[in-house]
Amino acid sequence: MPGITFDAGGLIAVDRHERRITVLLARASETRARVTIPASVLAQAIRKPERQVRLARLIRQPTTDVIDLDRVDATHVGRLLAVSGTADIVDAHVVVCARRAHQRVVTSDPDDLLRLDPSLEVLVV
């Protein structure tokens, strides 16, 4: 498993302790696969960090990378939005991060992501 990138729906599934996500994260841990969380996605999903224990545990793992929306990524996001004719910055950041890491995206709503990149591999939860 090369790793996985989460969108907000995927992180919400982590927080809800959904079985499929638990199994996926256990497999990622066993294989030391990287877990990518765009910081923009974390901002969408985190509401009460003191109560979101599973999410807090995930972002503290040594194999988890929280990726800032820096100048370089912001430029890639803007270009992707222009080409796709869409406007969701967070979804575009997910696509940029997943492409760079060659990872599948864990999502509850693949449609907007696939509009940005029809070749994107998604795992629907």
Image (cartoon, helix red, strand yellow):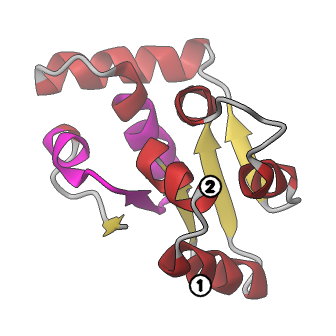
Q: Is residue 15 left or right of residue 65?
A: left
- Asked if the residue at tag 1 contacts the one at tag 2, i.e. Cβ–Cβ closer than 8 Å, the answer is no
- According to the picture, the residue beneath numbered tag 1 turns out to be 23
Q: Is residue 94 magenta?
A: yes
The dot on residue 15 is: 2
Residue, x 16% and y 21% (percent of image)?
86
Residue 112 coordinates in the image, percent (x, y): 20, 40
Numbered label tally: 2
Category of crowding for the residue at label 1, using alpha-carbon neighbours closer than 10 angstroms: few (below 14), some (14–19), many (at least 20):
few
Q: Amino acid at mark 1?
A: Val
For the magenta stretch, what is the residue range? 92-115
Residue, x 57% and y 79% (percent of image)?
24
Q: Amino acid at mark 2?
A: Asp
Query: Toward which corner of the image does residue 122 lie, by quadrant?
Result: bottom left
Q: Nearer the viewer, mark 2 or mark 1?
A: 2
Residue 19 coordinates in the image, percent (x, y): 53, 80
Q: Give the camera-side residue of 18 and 31.
A: 18
Q: Is residue 112 above or below residue 107?
A: above
Point out the image quarter for the C terminus. Answer: bottom left
The dominant secondary structure in magenta is: helix
Residue 10 coordinates in the image, percent (x, y): 48, 55
Q: Is residue 36 visible?
A: yes
Point out the image quarter for the N terminus. Answer: bottom right
The dot on residue 68 is: none
